[in-house]
Image (spheres, helix red, strand yellow):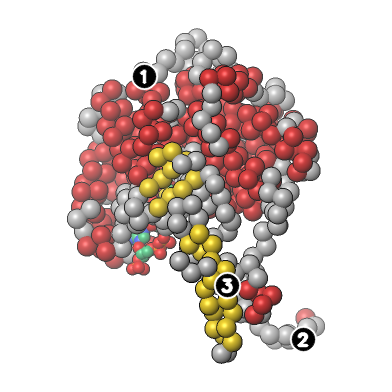
Amino acid sequence: MATTAALKIDDKDYPLPVIVGTENEKAIDVRNLRAQTGFITLDDGYGNTGACTSDITFIDGDAGILRYRGYPIEQLAEQSGFVETAYLIINGHLPTPTERRKFGDLLREHSPVHSAMGHLFEGFPIGSHPMAILSALLNSLGCYYPHLATNKVQEDLANFDEAAAVAISKVRTIAAMSYRKSRGLPYIYPKRNLPYCENFLHMMFSQPYEDYVPTPEVTQALNLFLLLHADHEQNCSTSTVRMVASSGANLFASVAAGVCALWGPLHGGANQAVIEMLESIHAEGDDGSKFIESARAGKNGHRLMGFGHRVYKNYDPRAKIIKASFEKALASLHIKDDPLLAIARRLEEVALKDDYFLSRKLYPNVDFYSGLIMRALGIPQNMFTVMFAIGRMPGWIAHWKEVASNPKNKINRPRQIYVGPTVRNYVPIAQRG
Ligand code: CMC
């Protein structure tokens, strides 16, 4: 395999180094391109651009492979849990029993939020989107833990384990509190004896007079949902976290920015968009056929939400796993006659045989099923993307650490090709027509 590639500009050859990853992924190293040639590369959407090297997650989109730190997602989904997988993603190895216990203790210790944070919730108007609240409150953690958010990278790294535990544990408490606030319900405090997922469901659904006790299938479905979302290499929100981290910003500021990037319907918002799509199809009395037709024609910007992926061009391995768990959770919750489910099944059946979708390699992604799972678990629609954020937190944290601990870190600063007006002279307002 060649170790250099050749670029020819105006008959002059420029050798460019070739970089090969451990899974044989190849890149042409253009780090010195501008200095050497005066040219930059243009790749809006970054579909052909490697922004970094990373040893956290490997994806082969064509083969439908996803691995965290080398472990296949299928094995982790079958044998691990969200908290252990979070440890793996952040620290690079599966925890020993002692490491696992210490990590669990740290998460337990940090599950409550500072009582003053309750006042922050009160400042938001009723009906505020919980993603806005989540982002604001995660960022505010730096005010409550100033020793973890100094914006001096070496100092922040020295207390990294604590900061990571604060972020993973409190994201779930803040999420549940933002839900309770949106419903006008009293906050339910975490219980020390409950595992991560059970504690979250307790804070969401218990009442002061009655504890909510989920079935094992419900807890398992939530655990799996979080695990499957725990990292996905250089997606929009993770790249945002890395971008912010590259400036030396603290962990909480960086993950708060990740929440904002995740909010959009083309990224984390897709699971909510799937349910909204199903509801509107149902309201129009369509069984899905008319919608497929309009998505195929690109009419009114219609897209089949939950289908397609920038990276997976075969199938999304997470979608396969979550679909199987979804069927189990539905059976345990005795859900049979949900009209939205029938529409989803019909859309999937039709799209998987349709030339338009097949020729563009558009297959169901994880969000096609995850919205339906959360709906079945009783999670309200505007909390779906928040659930994704809870799941993605370990990935964001691991990427923040990768950037912060890289001695060769450079602030991320892409360039552009300017296509606006060339120089022109200022005209005083009285002389403007
Ligand atoms: N429904 C109908 N047509 C589609 C869809 C869709 N869901 N997705 C892509 N296309 C068409 C698109 O119109 C284009 O057609 P043409 O070549 O005729 O112009 C072609 O497929 C390629 O589309 P693209 O927008 O260039 O593809 P992309 O790689 O930039 O977009 C995507 C990836 C996920 C943004 C897109 O497939 C999409 O909008 N899907 C629906 C939203 C969704 O489910 N998002 C969740 C992604 S998974 C969660 C995550 O990891 O963040």
Residue type for callout 3: Leu
Separation of disc 3 and disc 1 at Cα? Answer: 55 Å
Residue at x 70% of width, y 57% of height: 410
Separation of disc 2 and disc 3 at Cα? Answer: 42 Å
Image position, residue 73 (x, y; %):
40, 39
Residue type for callout 1: Pro
The answer to whether residue 371 shows anywhere in this view is no
Image position, residue 330 (x, y; %):
28, 28
Separation of disc 2 and disc 1 at Cα? Answer: 70 Å
Residues tagged 2 and 3 counted as in contact (Cβ below 8 A): no
In the displayed structure, would residue 358 be above or below residue 196?
below
Image position, residue 303 (x, y; %):
35, 57
Q: Which residue is mark 1?
A: 216
Q: Which residue is mark 2?
A: 425
Q: Dot 1, how many residues are within 10 Å of its Cα: few (below 14), some (14-19), or many (20+)?
A: few
In the displayed structure, would residue 377 be above or below residue 38?
above
Image position, residue 74 (x, y; %):
36, 37
Q: Dot 3, how many residues are within 10 Å of its Cα: few (below 14), some (14-19), or many (20+)?
A: some
Comparing labels 2 and 3, the label whose residue is closer to the camera: 3
At numbered mark 2, what does the secondary structure look like: helix, strand or loop? loop
